[in-house]
């Protein structure tokens, strides 16, 4: 059964098997949306769950994401043709003054694996750049990351900039990073905080009513 | 006893009287404290172009700054950042600091060769290599260890360097970057070789990593390092538990919550200092320090607050 084997290949990060099984599935006339929604996304959701409970680690998450990417490369044109919509659009970035990107990249990867469209602004993203990105891309959600206690204030400044630009009510904001806590989240007025990439994906879906 | 001797006694988990030794892996606030750029932050791209007289002035300036830091903040050890970072400049800096301080301080430099958490695009490249070409990755791990031990051998001929701090970070707050199985395959054997190799040459070895080390702590201790640094409370590492379970095997360094030093109240910083002292000090084998370092952006007043508590309460009866 191709959907199960694709699921298994993505879950275990076996990119070669994921490609072979996807091609076989398409030849067997299994639809691209079914491959996405019944194999890839459930597999990445399971990866996130196992990561959250400490049974999978970052490398396993990354090679699972790579396997999913290989599948997406094959089915993307078919998804576009079928006009399959994403779960939501996310703008993500590490805040001003902070050049760390590991956590931010993992969250982006897991969100993509959960069916979100990702616009990655990179690191050292100024409050103004977040505002411009919202104007340009009109996302449903913004993800902000800070690794350093000394750059956490940039999260607050970015949220203030979005509020001043009159954009705050139209988007959800989630934040994360080593020093970020629920108390800090409440203080700066973000919609949620996630301790790791797996829970970030769950939080994003929950905030957008896609859980 | 000189600070160096007290530091060594702590590393060897021998009982001490007086104040528990203190040092910081890095003290980056040298501009605020002394009006000087930290040696690590200096850009010596024209080093070779300089006249030897000018190079020597720079060496003296850096050595003086290391010593001023150690003296003002009562460090027992100095972590040297040789700049430019090569064997020759390490030798010269070691000799200069030794001469100027009359052997007063324990001297160490960075000496890790094991795989740390990669940054940027190197992270995914590394992970894919582990998955796709594990034997080549292990070969590289071995070559890195060989090079590090070769450099240590050259430094040994000069003498004066007491030890190495192995600063490859392995862990996030949530746990290790690599799964414990991967860690035991791609890091542990090489870390063990490195620690044992340094120790055979007579060096002391401090293994540093931030984050939650508990799932891999046995791996970290396999090569029997003298000390574990930073015992990161932000990663959920409880010094009381580590002292109870591993205090008879390794000296502990750190645990004062550096995150709280930025975001907490004075009371929370004081509480963190007291917790580290209370659980680290009993029976020796503890060196007082933050759970990271005095990094750029930290308030100097918070470090001074931490030291005030240590001066009053970090004393063996």
Image: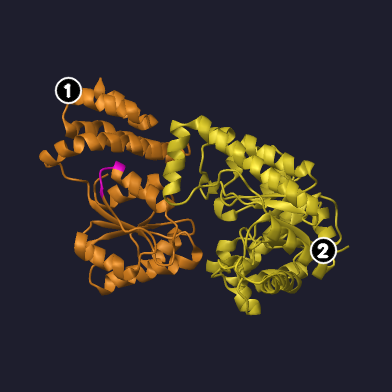
- Badge number at residue B48: none
Q: Residue A121, located in which quarter of the rendered image? A: bottom left
Q: Is residue A143 above or below residue A211?
A: below
Helix, strand or loop under label 2: helix
Q: Please state the extent of the stretch shown in magenta in the rendering.
A: A113-117
Residue at 11%, 42% in the rendered image: A83
Q: Position of residue A95 (x, y in %)?
A: 39, 64
The residue that disc 1 covers is A27
Q: Position of residue B244 (x, y in %)?
A: 72, 45
Residue A114 inside the magenta-drawn segment: yes
Query: Disc 2 to disc 1, how far (Cα)?
Result: 74 Å
Query: Image quadrant for the C terminus of chain A?
Result: top left
Number of marks in picture:
2
Residue at 32%, 56% in the rendered image: A92
Describe residue A206's horizontal placement relative to residue B274 as left or right.
left
Chain letter, yellow: B
Chain letter, orange: A
- Badge number at residue B3: 2
Describe residue A162's horizontal placement relative to residue B239 as left or right.
left
Tell which of B145 and A141 is nearer to you. Answer: B145
Q: How many neighbours does mark 2 have within 10 angstroms: few (below 14), some (14-19), or many (20 or more)? A: some
Helix, strand or loop under label 1: helix
Residue A164 inside the magenta-drawn segment: no
Q: Are marks 2 and 1 on the same chain?
A: no
- Prevailing secondary structure class for the magenta stretch in the rendered image: loop
Q: How many neighbours does mark 1 have within 10 angstroms: few (below 14), some (14-19), or many (20 or more)? A: few
């Amino acid at each position: 059964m191709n959907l199960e084997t694709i699921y298994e290949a993505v879950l275990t990060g076996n990119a070669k098997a994921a490609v072979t099984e996807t091609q076989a599935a398409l030849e067997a006339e299994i639809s691209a949306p079914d491959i996405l929604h019944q194999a890839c996304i459930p597999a990445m959701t399971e990866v996130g769950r196992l990561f959250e409970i400490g049974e999978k680690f970052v490398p396993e998450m990354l090679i699972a994401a790579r396997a999913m990417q290989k599948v997406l490369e094959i089915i993307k044109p078919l998804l576009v043709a079928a006009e399959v919509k994403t779960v939501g659009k996310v703008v993500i970035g590490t805040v001003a003054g902070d050049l760390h990107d590991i956590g931010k990249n993992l969250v982006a990867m897991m969100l993509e694996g959960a069916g979100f469209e990702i616009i990655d602004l990179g690191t050292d993203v100024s409050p103004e750049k977040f505002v411009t990105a919202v104007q340009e891309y009109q996302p449903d959600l913004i993800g902000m990351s800070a690794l350093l206690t000394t750059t956490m204030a940039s999260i607050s400044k970015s949220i203030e900039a979005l509020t001043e630009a009159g954009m705050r009510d139209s988007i959800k904001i989630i934040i994360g990073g080593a020093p970020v806590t629920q108390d800090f989240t409440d203080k700066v007025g973000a919609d949620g905080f996630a301790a790791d990439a797996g829970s970030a994906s769950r939080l994003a879906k929950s905030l957008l009513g896609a859980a | 006893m000189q600070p160096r001797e007290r530091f060594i006694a702590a590393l060897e988990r021998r009982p001490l009287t007086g104040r528990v030794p203190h040092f910081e892996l890095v003290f980056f606030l040298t501009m605020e404290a002394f009006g000087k750029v930290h040696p690590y932050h200096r850009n010596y791209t024209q080093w070779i172009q300089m006249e030897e007289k000018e190079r020597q002035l720079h060496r003296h300036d850096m050595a003086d700054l290391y010593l001023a830091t150690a003296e003002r903040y009562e460090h027992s050890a100095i972590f040297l950042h040789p700049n430019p970072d090569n064997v020759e400049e390490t030798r010269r800096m070691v000799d200069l600091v030794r001469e100027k301080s009359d052997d007063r301080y324990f001297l160490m430099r960075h000496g890790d060769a094991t795989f740390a958490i990669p940054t940027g695009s190197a992270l995914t490249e590394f992970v894919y290599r582990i998955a796709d070409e594990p034997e080549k990755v292990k070969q590289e791990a071995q070559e890195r260890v060989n090079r590090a031990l070769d450099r240590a051998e050259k430094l040994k001929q000069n003498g004066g360097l007491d030890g190495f701090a192995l600063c490859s970070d392995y862990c996030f707050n949530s746990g290790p970057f690599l799964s414990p199985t991967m860690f035991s395959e791609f890091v542990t054997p090489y870390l063990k070789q490195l620690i044992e190799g340094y120790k055979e040459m007579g060096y002391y070895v401090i293994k540093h990593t931030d984050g939650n080390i508990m799932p891999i702590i046995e791996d970290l201790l396999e090569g029997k390092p003298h000390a574990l640094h930073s015992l990161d409370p932000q990663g959920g590492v409880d010094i009381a538990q580590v002292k109870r379970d591993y205090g008879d095997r390794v000296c502990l360094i750190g645990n004062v919550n550096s995150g709280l030093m930025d975001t907490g109240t004075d009371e929370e910083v004081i509480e963190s200092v007291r917790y580290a002292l209370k659980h680290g000090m009993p029976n020796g084998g503890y060196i007082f320090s933050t759970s990271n370092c005095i990094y750029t952006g930290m308030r100097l007043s918070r470090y001074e607050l931490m030291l005030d508590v240590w001066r009053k309460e970090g004393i063996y009866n």
